[in-house]
Amino acid sequence: MSDAAGISFRMCPIGFVRTPYGDSSEVPKGPGAEHKAEGVLEIRPDLEPGLTDIEGFSHLIVLWAFDRSDGYDLLVTPPTGDRPHGLFATRVPRRPNPLAMTVVELLGRDGASLRVRGVDMLDSTPILDIKPYLSAIPADRIRRGWLDDAEARRGSPQGKSE
């Protein structure tokens, strides 16, 4: 196994997202949090041909950067937790590589702009990639680790994000 600490690479945003959230305190979090806010994924005009046929998908995976996050801890207590968990068993924004993923519902397309529902990122957040959402995993086979226990203690419905 090689030492990955010396490897680096650069990413360029493919666009930016427009959302109603100006501050992280405004984004719904914790048990039962529902992400119903609408936003627009504004893709760079030179990449618009890459959106061809995207309208056929109901949901998209948006990969984006926690661009306003700094530093990280390996043990964290997220909003839904009552004790520390390993960083990689959570979705907290402070990470060694501040990457995030959100599944959104595609509402429509206007050129290089995609109207979506389910945003949980701050306004002007850089978008790194978009992929159509596809899953072959049956819902009854998905396990949610410590989140299932935390939500059961709080009486929250299963399936909500932290």
Image (spheres, grey):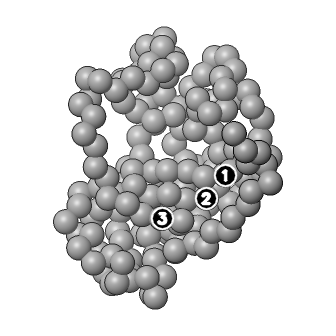
- Earlier-in-chain disc, 1 versus 2: 2
Q: Residue at x 45, y 50 (%)?
A: 102
- Earlier-in-chain disc, 2 versus 3: 2
* Residue indicated by mark 1: 98
Q: CA distance from mark 2 to mark 3?
A: 10 Å
The answer to whether 160 appears left or right of 135 in the picture is: right
Q: Quadrant of residue 56?
A: bottom left
The answer to whether 67 appears left or right of 45 in the picture is: right
Q: Amino acid at mark 3?
A: Asp
Q: Is residue 144 above or below residue 106?
A: above
Q: Where residue 129 is drawn, which disc sits there?
A: 3
- Earlier-in-chain disc, 3 versus 1: 1
Q: Amino acid at mark 2?
A: Ala
Q: Residue furthest bottom?
A: 46
Q: Position of residue 17 (x, y in %)?
A: 50, 68
Q: Amino acid at mark 1?
A: Pro
Give the mark toward the camera: 2 or 3. 3
Circle 3: element type: strand
**Callout 1 environment at 10 Å: few (<14), some (14 to 19), or many (20+)?**
some
Could one spot residue 62 in this view of the protein? Answer: yes
Circle 2: element type: strand
